């Protein structure tokens, strides 16, 4: 089913290990334009192109550093996107006219099968309306895009839960443009030190990293949780906490990301937790940064972007 719709140049929601994507034939302007339409996404925000493997990726790029090959060998398929100089056949609509294309081989078996059999790469942003929290289950996609797309390929819950880490090169320097599901430590263990340069919307290198991304509709306050709870003591607040905490006033509603404080489990539950609290009758959400190590960096980045500041 998914493949027929894709061949008909219609967008289809696909599972990946990070978040669900809204996919279309990356080589067709018409198909790619449908993604922007459905997501209500501004055309200056470029799309990641999904391939089955590095062998497929090289068909779409001109030159690349050896470190890119190394990272693809070690971490693909997986939550890593590589920004590399594009060949001319990649539509400008996909890259927003930028000289590099973002490439990723996702891990999910259903999507891998599509990419191996489909005969074309898939451009896919996260399958949420622009600016809202990314979906990590088929139900999340359905809640927001039902009626706007012909098909959702249900592959269960995403195993990583935050978007891919984006890496590119500036001269000899490897640069992380988006913190994500592959930790900086893992990257550095393969290719040595990387710079981290997280982009805002005005930056042409990765113009999609708008501050307001990942935002729930309820205001989210980020800070020391004990203090936040104290100062909102009377309010019907949602509390998003890494581990269970005691002593909350009874009208507050808590969502715990991981019983044991495990950061991988926390990343997996993060967007679901934000959605649960956003959909409940709380009036605001209180949250605290998690330890800044491993996937904690990506979690904190999403919390910051979701917060009012
Ligand atoms: O895990 C993920 O990466 C998910 C799944 C579906 O693969 N996709 C995803 O796509 O998060 P999206 O559209 O929500 O974020 C893509 C971001 C853009 O906003 C931009 O920051 C960066 O990737 N990007 C994509 N293509 C680029 C390009 N040609 N040049 C610079 N930045 C680019
Ligand atoms: Mg997104």
Image (cartoon, rainbow, N blue to C red):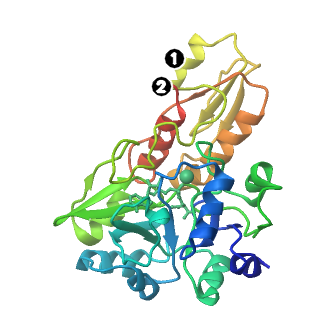
Q: Crowding at label 1, few (<14), some or many (≥20) Cα neighbours within 10 Å? A: few
Residue for badge 2: 223
Relative depth, front residue between 103 and 88: 88
Q: Crowding at label 2, few (<14), some or many (≥20) Cα neighbours within 10 Å? A: some
Tell me the distance, in whole angstroms, between the alpha carbons under discs 1 and 2: 8 Å
Q: Position of residue 308 (x, y in %)?
A: 52, 26
- Image-based side of 197 in relation to 79, left or right: left
- Image-based side of 5 in relation to 182, left or right: right
Q: Secondary structure at mark 2?
A: loop
Q: Position of residue 77 (x, y in %)?
A: 49, 77
C-beta proximity under 8 Å, tags 1 and 2: yes
Relative depth, front residue between 268 and 263: 268
Q: Position of residue 216 (x, y in %)?
A: 63, 35
Residue 308 is at least partly visible in this image: yes
Residue 305, label in figure: none
Residue for badge 1: 227
Q: Position of residue 238 (x, y in %)?
A: 68, 27
- Residue plotted at (40% across, 61% down): 97
Q: Residue furthest front?
A: 30
Q: Where, quadrant-wise, is the N terminus in this rendering? A: bottom right
């Amino acid at each position: 089913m998914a493949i027929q719709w894709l061949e008909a140049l219609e967008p289809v929601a696909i599972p990946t290990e990070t978040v669900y994507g809204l996919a279309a034939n990356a080589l067709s302007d018409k198909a790619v334009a449908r993604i922007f339409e459905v997501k209500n996404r501004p055309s200056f925000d470029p799309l990641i192109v999904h391939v089955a493997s590095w062998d497929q990726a090289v068909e779409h790029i001109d030159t690349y550093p050896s470190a890119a090959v190394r990272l693809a060998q070690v971490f693909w398929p997986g939550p890593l996107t590589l920004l590399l100089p594009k060949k001319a056949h990649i539509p400008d609509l996909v890259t927003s006219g930028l000289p590099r294309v973002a490439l990723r081989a996702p891990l999910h078996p259903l999507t891998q099968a599509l990419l191996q059999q489909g005969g074309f790469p898939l451009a896919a942003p996260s399958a949420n309306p622009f600016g809202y929290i990314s979906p990590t289950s088929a139900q999340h996609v359905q809640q927001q895009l039902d009626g706007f797309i012909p098909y959702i390929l249900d592959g269960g819950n995403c195993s990583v839960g935050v978007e891919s880490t984006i890496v590119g090169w500036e001269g000899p320097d490897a640069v992380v443009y988006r913190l994500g599901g592959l930790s900086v430590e893992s990257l550095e263990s393969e290719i040595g030190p990387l710079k981290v340069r997280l982009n805002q919307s005005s930056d042409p290198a990765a113009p999609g990293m708008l501050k307001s991304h990942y935002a729930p509709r309820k205001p989210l306050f980020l800070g020391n949780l004990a203090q936040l709870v104290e100062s909102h003591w009377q309010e019907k607040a949602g509390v998003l906490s890494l581990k269970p905490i005691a002593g909350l006033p009874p009208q507050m509603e808590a969502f715990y990301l991981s019983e044991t404080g495990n950061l991988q489990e926390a990343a997996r539950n993060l967007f679901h937790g934000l959605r649960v609290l956003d959909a409940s009758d709380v009036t605001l959400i209180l949250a605290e940064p998690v330890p800044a190590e491993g996937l904690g960096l990506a979690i904190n980045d999403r919390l910051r972007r979701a917060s009012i500041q």
